[in-house]
Amino acid sequence: MKILYTATLLFVTHFSYSQNVPIDFEAGGNGLNWTWTTFENDTNPPLEIVVNPDPSGINTSATVAKFTALQSGAAWAGCESMHGSDIGSFTLNNSNCTVTIMVWKSVISDVGIKFVDATNAAQPEIKVANSLINQWEELTFDFSSRIGVYPITKDQIVIFPDFDLGGRTQDNIIYFDNVYNTNTNTAIINYGLKDLTIHPNPAKGLVNIDIQNYKGPIEVKIYDLMGSLIAKTNHHLIDIKLLPKGLYFFSVSYNNISEVVKIIKD
């Protein structure tokens, strides 16, 4: 049973700001041809865009960013985009204040992210530590407390891939990819998953939606990483073989409940 693809713009939802996301480092995407500058990393080896060293789990994309945090570098060594034209100019609001990034690290340490305005003014970075090593993991950063806080208009992203105040015992290589903002306008907000399962995941073709103790009608909306609605159906069994490889959000509504599941298309 094929997915019913929407054919008109009526069902397509776009971000309400001029931010260039997701940062996926793919040809035709964002990040690959940006002007990245490294800082506070001793000799400051440049940020590299490389073949994904581990195309498995949640990240099977072709290319990713590689940051080498030198033992002799500062704990806050990192990289930053060029002001303005790279990420664009935007303000934080309820539709874009949750930022996620996929990382592959061999050590446990904080990852930091902050946004900067054209005058280099910024609030302190928000830090989240990875909990997994030697595999891809997605980290989530909540910037909701920064909504309406000076500086209002941002035009640069700064990433600290290995923010280790304890000091490094060696050079650490960190890969990161798929930096994007959750768009609550597309209802990608609830990850409770108390009753809902979608399997298999990752999937290549048919996926089945199971809802515990419920066999009634459902509505399924499928969103891409940009938060755009690309398909909708009312079926429990969905064929996704025509979708390109990547990460998708399945928003499932049933019995006055909405839940969202991240699905990887192999």
Image (cartoon, grey):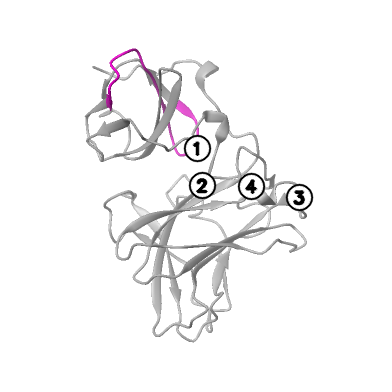
- Contact flag, marks 4 and 2 (Cβ < 8 Å): no
Element type where label 4 sits in the image: helix
> Which amino acid does the dot numbered 1 rest on?
Met
Mark 3: give few (<14), some (14-19) or many (20+) Cα within 10 Å.
some
Reply yes or no: does residue 53 show up in magenta. Answer: no
Residue 14 vertical placement versus 55 (above, below) = above
Q: How many marks?
A: 4
Residue 31 vertical placement versus 111 (above, below) = above
Mark found first going from the N terminus, 3 or 4 = 4
Q: Name the main secondary structure of what is drawn in magenta.
A: loop
Question: Which one is in front in this view, the residue at disc 1 or the one at disc 3?
Answer: 3
Looking at the picture, tell me which residue is in the foreground, 93 or 231. Answer: 93
User: Mark number for residue 226?
Assistant: 1
According to the picture, the residue beneath numbered tag 3 turns out to be 152
According to the picture, the residue beneath numbered tag 2 turns out to be 180
- Contact flag, marks 3 and 4 (Cβ < 8 Å): no
Residue ID at (24%, 36%): 203
Mark found first going from the N terminus, 1 or 2 = 2
> Which amino acid does the dot numbered 3 rest on?
Ile
Mark 1: give few (<14), some (14-19) or many (20+) Cα within 10 Å.
some
Residue ID at (41%, 33%): 260
On screen, residue 198 versus residue 163, left or right, reads: left
Q: Measure the alpha-carbon separation of dots 2 and 3.
A: 19 Å
> Which amino acid does the dot numbered 4 rest on?
Ser
- Contact flag, marks 1 and 2 (Cβ < 8 Å): yes
Residue 106, given in percent of the width and then of the height, sits at 34, 70
According to the picture, the residue beneath numbered tag 4 turns out to be 144
> Which amino acid does the dot numbered 2 rest on?
Tyr
Residue 181, given in percent of the width and then of the height, sits at 54, 44
Q: Measure the alpha-carbon separation of dots 1 and 3.
A: 23 Å
